[in-house]
Image (cartoon, coloured by chain):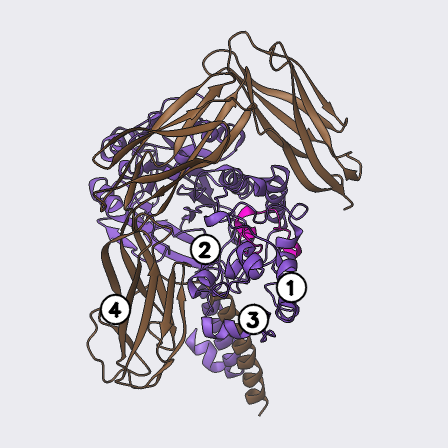
Chain colours: A brown, B purple
């Protein structure tokens, strides 16, 4: 009797232990093993989910089009198949299940809708079917194909690169429609006042747009978009992003140092990269404040990519409260004699 | 032994339970690496193609992924075995523009905190401009690698490969990590770089590395077919991590000759792990291991993994930077047709007071406050669906300049109301399902069904207004 009692306790301990381990492992997945060629298994114990065609390729479609596909499946086991969930891993794909419960020998459907609006090129999206099939608790379906744009833009982004303060520069973009023989650009609107865009050439529906950086803005990075309105049925509105940087004699990255909320007593350091864009320009001194912030040049290269790498350290003695400090670089540049890098953060009680 | 057990039958249950517990603990290893394996092994964590996805925004329950959860899982894995090698396939940002520049820097800082060994350069990283990429390479502690691109700049710190040494017990394993970007994925108008066919560029590197390393891994930023081709050409690779635009790491795991090819997944919603165990131990400096795959796992980053405070702090700084740089003010705006303008809910309320009072109690009305609660009110990607008319002139600009347009107001669904206010025209007021679906799309509103959701906001009948 005593032995039986001991056995019961120990087996219960094992069961509890096993239960917790199972919980821990639930989220992990082994490599999927969709058995696409299994035959009807009349002797299978439990339910068996079976998809004849788990992978669907829609071929080539235009961006913005929606694709709908029905995945048919069958319960080839001898117990009721319960579908717990149908998960899509992308917001672009919706999956609707006709019924959660499929008796043995019966079929079910999953209707998948894929929206191509945010893609170009080849894509593969997956749908996971979670069921009580002991061999395939997670069955993976895929929907794949190529998404092409009606309006082709070359290059897709306009990178002005580094433009020296005061300089003007321009870039060209070629635009055409793949389906509209009488393609027209109706409107061109740049998002920034210092950028202008106009049609430079037009031949047989192929446009060359000249994008000019004119009124030079202040030193620093800039970005925006050229907004086009076209007569394309599929892409009435098109955006061409542009970006670049207006540089002086010296470029710093980042232009602000953020430490965030820091527990009192903790020491943190960040790197500041200082690029020298003109010969004979150098840093004469560096000042930091408050005094619990220090700066040290850890790398100084004078030829081939002249630059400084500065370590900016927040020391452990920093007082509780907002930092609101700065690092100042004193240089021999006429246009940038002092470069100020704000230092932002807050020291909190531990 | 059996005889001993039979003699002491009272111990039988104890022995059985002991054996069962030992067996159950072996299962546990599948999630937490192979620390108990007697042979030395390499544990690899692979992620990539974040495409600017920092964390679940909170719009819907059970969103996967996010850097704070990733950090927590990495820490848990490291508690079991500190020798994990973390690899990033490439494509940290999603699109170009200032917000994604800040995102890219934020993700890199997170990879730095998680102690990633290498980041392979993807085409979306390049799309941000070589200048930015160069600056980031200078301030980041994560090694940037690319084995097939010549960058026409000295500012960019990039290596053709790295060798990571892992010491396990008495053995030191040398892991060579290379990275390529498919020429097919790069805009051919990019003048600052020269892209070499990976099959050509890898050959000299491999002949140099084969004798110096025990395991070779390729981060192949290419479509899976191209990665398989590389694996076929160079069986020297033990593992090729690939899968451009394949959304889950688990699908398409392939063995090509002796090389495993596995996709990385998208947006960091999953974390992939692989343990490579050698078949034989090295006996001299020149012999390489013949590795075999002992375990591979795809771990969905769900609510089981709490947010890491360190990475949460980086995301707070990210939000602070969006605020400081006033990115909401930089949102590109277009004109409205026929000189229409947004008038705000208060003007609508003059005639439609009953509807207005009903609306005030809906979640549409408090959509802006929802963002305030999570500190995302300066995030242009979030605020578009929590205010009225952000992308149009006369629409929402800032909470100070256009307070009447906060929340999802009347004009979010019905369009700008200036003309209707003047004329009380009857043709104003219709709202199509497609308008709802701009914000209630599957990612942020997976349960959206117009019929059900309409019930949540159905307007009471208003008394007929004269005219």
Image quarter where the C terminus of chain B lies is bottom right
Residues marked 2 and 1, same chain? yes
Q: Chain of mark 2?
A: B
Q: Foreground residue, A192 or A350? A: A192
The answer to which quarter of the image holds residue B325 is: top right
Q: Which residue is mark 3?
A: B457
Mark 4: secondary structure: loop
Q: Which residue is mark 1?
A: B349
Residue B42 in the figure: left or right of residue B366? left
Q: Position of residue B380 (x, y in %)?
A: 55, 47
> Which mark, residue B269?
2
Q: Chain of mark 3?
A: B
Residues marked 2 and 3, same chain? yes
Q: Which residue is mark 4?
A: A35
User: Counting residues from the N terminus, which is met first, the one under dot 1 or under dot 3?
Assistant: 1
Residue at 29% x, 34% y: name it: B210
Number of the front mark, 2 or 4: 2
Residue at 61% x, 15% y: name it: A336
Q: Position of residue B369 (x, y in %)?
A: 65, 58
Residue furthest bottom in the image? A1
Please check the rendered image and state whether residue B242 is part of the magenta-colored stretch, yes or no: no
The answer to which quarter of the image holds residue A87 is: bottom left
């Amino acid at each position: 009797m005593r032995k039986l009692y001991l056995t019961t306790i120990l087996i219960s301990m094992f069961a509890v232990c096993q239960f917790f381990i199972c919980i821990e492992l639930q989220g992990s997945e082994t490599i999927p093993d969709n058995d696409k060629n299994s035959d009807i298994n009349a002797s299978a114990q439990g339910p068996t989910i079976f998809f004849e065609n788990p992978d669907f390729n829609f071929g080539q479609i235009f961006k913005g089009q929606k694709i709908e596909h029905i995945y048919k499946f069958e319960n080839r086991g001898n117990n009721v198949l319960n579908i717990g969930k149908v998960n899509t891993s992308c917001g672009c794909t919706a999956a609707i299940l006709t019924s959660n419960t499929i008796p043995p020998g019966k079929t079910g459907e999953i209707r998948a809708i894929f929206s191509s609006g945010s893609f170009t090129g080849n894509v593969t999206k997956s749908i996971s079917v979670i069921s009580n099939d002991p061999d395939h608790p997670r069955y993976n379906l895929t929907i794949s194909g190529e998404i092409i744009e009606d309006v082709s833009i070359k290059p897709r982004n306009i990178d002005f690169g580094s433009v020296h303060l005061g300089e003007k520069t321009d870039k060209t973009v070629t635009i055409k429609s793949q389906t509209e023989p009488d393609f027209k650009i109706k409107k061109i609107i740049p998002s920034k006042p210092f950028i202008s865009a106009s049609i430079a050439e037009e031949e047989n529906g192929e446009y060359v747009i000249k994008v000019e950086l004119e009124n030079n803005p202040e030193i620093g990075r800039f970005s925006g978009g050229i907004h086009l309105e076209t007569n394309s049925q599929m892409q009435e509105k098109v955006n061409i992003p542009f970006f670049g940087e207006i540089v002086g004699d010296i470029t710093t990255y980042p232009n602000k140092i953020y430490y965030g909320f820091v527990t009192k007593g903790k020491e943190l350091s960040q790197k500041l990269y200082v690029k020298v864009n003109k010969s004979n320009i150098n840093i004469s001194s560096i000042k930091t404040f408050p005094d619990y912030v220090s700066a040290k040049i850890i790398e100084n290269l004078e030829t081939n990519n002249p630059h400084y790498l500065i370590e900016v350290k927040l020391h452990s003695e920093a007082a509780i409260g907002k930092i609101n400090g700065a690092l100042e670089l004193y240089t021999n540049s006429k246009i940038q004699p002092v470069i100020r890098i704000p230092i932002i953060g807050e020291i909190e009680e531990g | 032994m059996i005889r001993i057990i039979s003699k002491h039958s009272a111990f039988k249950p104890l022995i059985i339970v002991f054996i069962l517990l030992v067996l159950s603990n072996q299962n546990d290893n599948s999630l937490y690496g192979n620390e108990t394996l007697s042979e030395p092994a390499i544990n690899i964590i692979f992620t990539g193609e974040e495409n600017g996805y920092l964390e679940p925004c909170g719009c819907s329950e059970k969103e996967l992924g996010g850097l704070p959860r990733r950090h927590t899982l990495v820490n848990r894995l490291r508690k079991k075995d500190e020798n994990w090698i973390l690899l990033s396939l490439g494509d940290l940002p999603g699109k170009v523009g200032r917000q994604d520049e800040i995102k890219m820097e934020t993700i890199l800082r997170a990879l730095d905190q998680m102690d990633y060994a290498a980041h392979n350069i993807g085409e979306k990283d390049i799309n941000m401009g070589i200048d930015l990429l160069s600056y980031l390479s200078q301030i980041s502690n994560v090694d940037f690698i690319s084995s097939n691109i010549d960058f026409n700049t000295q500012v960019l710190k990039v290596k053709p490969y790295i060798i990571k040494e892992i010491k396990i017990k008495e053995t030191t394993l040398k892991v060579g990590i290379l990275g390529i970007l498919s020429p097919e994925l790069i805009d051919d108008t990019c003048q600052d770089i020269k892209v070499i066919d990976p099959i050509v560029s890898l050959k000299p590197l491999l002949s140099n590395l084969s004798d110096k390393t025990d395991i070779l891994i390729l981060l192949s930023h290419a479509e899976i077919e191209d990665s398989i081709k590389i694996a076929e050409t160079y069986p020297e690779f033990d593992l090729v991590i690939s899968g451009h635009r394949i959304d889950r790491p688990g699908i398409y795991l392939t063995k090509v000759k002796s090389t495993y090819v596995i996709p990385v997944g998208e947006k960091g919603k999953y974390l992939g792990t692989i343990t490579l165990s050698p078949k034989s131990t090295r006996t001299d400096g020149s012999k390489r291991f013949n590795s075999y795959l002992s375990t591979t796992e795809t771990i969905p980053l769900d609510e089981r993994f709490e947010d890491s405070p360190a990475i949460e702090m980086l995301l707070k700084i990210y939000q602070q930077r969006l605020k400081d740089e006033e990115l909401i003010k930089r949102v590109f705006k277009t004109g409205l047709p026929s000189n229409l303008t947004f008038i705000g809910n208060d003007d609508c309320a003059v005639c439609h007071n009953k509807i207005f009072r009903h609306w005030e109690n809906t979640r549409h009305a408090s959509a802006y406050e929802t963002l305030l609660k999570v500190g995302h009110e300066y995030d242009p990607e979030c605020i578009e669906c929590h205010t009225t008319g952000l992308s149009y002139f006369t629409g929402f600009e800032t909470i100070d300049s256009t307070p009447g347009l906060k929340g999802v107001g009347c004009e979010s669904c019905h369009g700008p109301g200036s003309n209707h206010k003047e004329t009380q025209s009857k043709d104003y007021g219709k709202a199509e399902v497609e308008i709802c679906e701009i914000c209630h799309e599957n990612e942020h509103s997976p349960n959206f069904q117009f019929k059900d959701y309409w019930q949540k906001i159905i307007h009471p009948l208003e008394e007929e207004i004269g005219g």
